[in-house]
Amino acid sequence: MAREPELSHTLHLSAVSPSYYRFHVEHLQSDDYSKDKDAPALIGEMDSSGSLNAHALLHLTERVRARTVFQTQQSQFVTWQFETEYRGNDFTAAVTVANPDIPRESVILVAHFLQSVSSGLVLGGELVYHRGRAEEGGILTLAGQYSRPNWVATLNAGKGGAHASYYHRASKQIQVGVEFEASTRTQETTTSFGYQMELPEANMVFRGMINSRCIIGGVLEKRLTPLPATLIMGAFVNHRGDKLQVGLGVNVG
Amino acid sequence: MGSVLAASAPNPPPTASGGIGAAPAPGMTVPPGFGIPSISPVAPTGQEQEADPPLPNPGAFDECHRKCKEVFPMQMEGVRLFVNKGLSNHFQVNHTLLLSTTGDSTYRFGATYVGTKQMGPAEFFPVIVGDMDNSGSLNAQIIHQVADRVRSKLAFQTQQNKFVNWQGDAEIKGEDFTATVTLGNPDVVVGSGIVVTHYLQSVTPALALGGELVYHRRPGEEGTVVSLVGRYTGSNYIATLTLGSAGAHASYYHRANEQLQLGVEYEASTRMQDTSVSFGYQLDVPKANLLFKGSVDSNWVVGATLEKKLLPLPLSLVLCTFLNHQKNKFQCGFGVTIG
């Protein structure tokens, strides 16, 4: 049985960028996709400036999934990509064709492969081939992830840089994450430390973050029972540039 | 009793029970207020229905528009932390940390000392209030009851190490009038200064009239600005009007019920040649420990403030957003008050 489409309206009033209204629709498949496999999952989002974001997800067979993504900036298409994914017993392989442009002879091809090596260890790689009128090139990145009941460690390393992350669930209420990013293109590295504290008795979730770029941030989310509303308050301070950003949000429903 | 006779003397002579001040001869019509008050042979007692109660003191001149202004939300942006701690019955300190998105962030330390001379149920004198900025800017005020009816105030303000404001004033609270003389930024060396005199008189229990005279002098020029003020207090409303050569300011405050208060304000300035109208309301929900203030302006500014006391903690949360439609500017801020 297909579910009803879910709608959401977002009104964003911003002090630094233009304010916008966004309309979002999700029509997801039912859980038992084998019965309804012909019905795609559709997600669409439209901005008050006309920018569109559309995803379509289709289960072709039990193991093969196809996905299409379109993104426009006002009236101009910036992304159009087609992806096919095959789920084996202990591996996943995906091929994506992004922004194929026959008149300009440009395309980006991405191939992903992830293999479960042991109960906790997953190894894989990503190959990106991009081609334009004047140049073409390929980038290979290797990925590894090791999971245990309480923590997950991930490492991506390639010619473009490295990305390592560590997630730890300290207790039922506290989760901690550390992230390290290095980019050869911008010649920069960043280390971030973040934590999430959940207080279900107080209907509150607090997330804090501190960064090697001297950015400290915190976001507090509180559910205002009995109203079906959530209040979000966030503040980010960039000590190096001496800038402060403050935000307030209300989620209804 | 809105008669002119009542206005001329602070304690009008009590009239006889039969008349309302005038007892004209039969057949003769007398303009109101011109009759001869009849003198009762019996001394008036407290049960006299027609006895004029003494006129109340009209309050300070600066407070005339205050009730209406308090209804409007205060604009703030960034993150504000305010910690207030009372060290004793006489002394309290406060720390304010303001992280601003647009300007500089500041830390401010303030102290308040309240003396031992008691003048009323909750009024103690002298009151010494001071606060200092992280850049060295100081604000200091000393308020003292010098004599039975005379209150004096000295105020100083500096911007870093330079004095920008130094003033002294004396306020005389009579039975039904208030007079204030303020001497601002007197500079004997340069020969400049500002003298402001205020006078506010209760004309009837509901009506108060007054005026303000500002004389400013600088080497080379001097001038005066006069403005008149009138305030009418009803059962649940206050209407105030200030008219002067610098402009006009009219405000109306209305208490609709226990929870809702409204205010409308009109300001016209001859110097800047523009007028503005603002409408504000305050919604008080004590059961939810909530205070909501909203305002709409003729400059296309819409703003709201929400204040919530987070019991049982001695904590108060303030959320504030202001949107200027004309300039397309949005400002939001929140603050936490502890203690």
Image: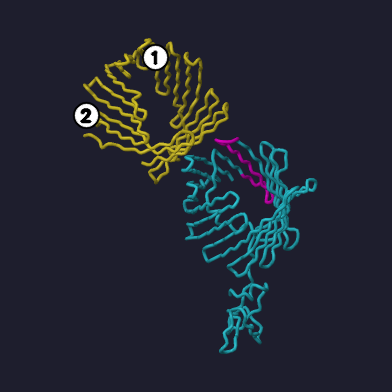
Chain colours: A yellow, B cyan
Q: Quadrant of residue B181?
A: bottom right
x and y percent of residue B296 in the render?
A: 48, 50
In this rendered view, identify the residue nearer to me: A235 or B154: B154
* Residue B306 on image: x %, y %: 49, 47
Q: Secondary structure at mark 2?
A: loop
Quadrant of image for the C terminus of chain A: top left
Region in magenta: B84-104
Up/down of B320 relative to A210, above or below? below
Marks 1 and 2 close (CB-CB < 8 Å):
no
- Magenta highlight on residue A52: no
**In-image side of B218 versus A188 (left or right):** right
Q: Residue at x 77, y 47 (%)?
A: B187
Rate crowding at label 2 as few (under 14), some (14 to 19) or many (20 or more) other CA atoms within 10 Å: some
Report the residue that reaches farthest toward the bottom. Answer: B26
Tell me the residue that label 2 is attached to. A39
Q: Amino acid at mark 2?
A: Ala
Q: CA distance from mark 1 to mark 2?
A: 33 Å
Q: Quadrant of residue A113?
A: top left
Q: Secondary structure at mark 1?
A: strand
Q: Position of residue B242 (x, y in %)?
A: 59, 59
Find out whether residue B103 is within the magenta segment: yes
Label disc, if present, on residue A127 of the rendered structure: none
Quickly name the residue at label 1: A143
Q: Chain of mark 2?
A: A
Q: Residue furthest right?
A: B189
**Residue A94 seen anywhere in this rendered image of the structure:** no
Residue A122, relative to residue A200: is it above or below?
above
Q: Nearer the viewer, mark 1 or mark 2?
A: 2
Give x and y (percent) for residue A160.
Answer: 43, 13
